[in-house]
Image: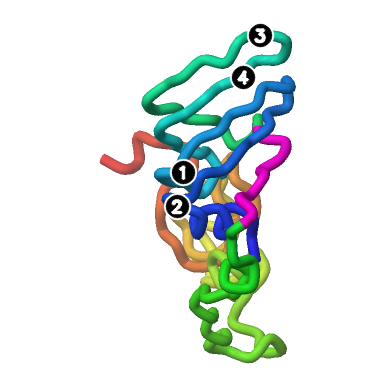
Amino acid sequence: MKLNRFLTKLVNETVTMELKNGTQVQGTITGVDTSMNSHLKQVKVTVRHKNPVNMAYLSIRGANIRYVILPDHADLNFLLIDDAPKQNPPMYPTGTVRGKGRGGGGGGGGGGGTRKPEESTKKDSGRSGGGGGGDRGGDRGGDRGGDRGGDRDRRR
């Protein structure tokens, strides 16, 4: 059981917390969030080597808490029961392969369409079928037909 889940079960209990700077805080827990930030009411704060100060409400950052001292009457057997909902097993067994991430499979680069004989002597403009890709872009593969650099005036 996670500590913050345990502390959420202590709502309306009076506890003493010792902070990392040595300050002791005694009060009634009104709430604890996922970062273990604790909210207390009817609080008595005792800073090290100083007089205690009473406050109506106080919030403590979870990372500053060193110890939580529980009341003597707290039923630990009840508090430690993990009643968190069980996570469902995964929908697909661990061994199955479901693709390769973004873009899935697909071939390598290059290849693709066929060129007409008169276009093979021209400089690639990116509009010929199949591989190439103009002056830039390298082997993009497929019969994309889009303009990838080269002569942009040919589009019009």
Marks 4 and 2 sit apart, C-alpha to C-alpha, by: 22 Å
Seen in the image, is 122 located left or right of residue 49?
left
Closer-to-camera residue (53/141): 53
According to the image, label 1 marks what residue? 29
Tell me if label 4 and label 3 are in contact, CB under 8 Å. Answer: yes
Up the image or down, 87 lies above or below 55; here it is below
Tell me if label 4 and label 2 are in contact, CB under 8 Å. Answer: no
Tell me if label 3 and label 1 are in contact, CB under 8 Å. Answer: no
Query: What amino acid type should be assigned to the residue bearing mark 2?
Result: Val
Query: What amino acid type should be assigned to the residue bearing mark 3?
Result: Lys
Marks 3 and 1 sit apart, C-alpha to C-alpha, by: 23 Å
Q: Which residues are magenta?
A: 65-72
Tell me if label 4 and label 1 are in contact, CB under 8 Å. Answer: no
Q: Across the whole image, how many numbered discs are drawn on residues?
A: 4
According to the image, label 3 marks what residue? 50
According to the image, label 2 marks what residue? 11
Location of residue 32 in the rendering, given as x and y in whole percent from the top left corner: 48, 46
SS of the residue under disc 3: loop
Q: How is the image coloured?
A: rainbow
Marks 2 and 1 sit apart, C-alpha to C-alpha, by: 5 Å
Up the image or down, 150 lies above or below 3; here it is above
Which is more N-terminal, label 2 or label 4? 2
Closer-to-camera residue (141/128): 141
Tell me if label 2 and label 1 are in contact, CB under 8 Å. Answer: yes
Q: Is residue 67 magenta?
A: yes
According to the image, label 4 marks what residue? 46
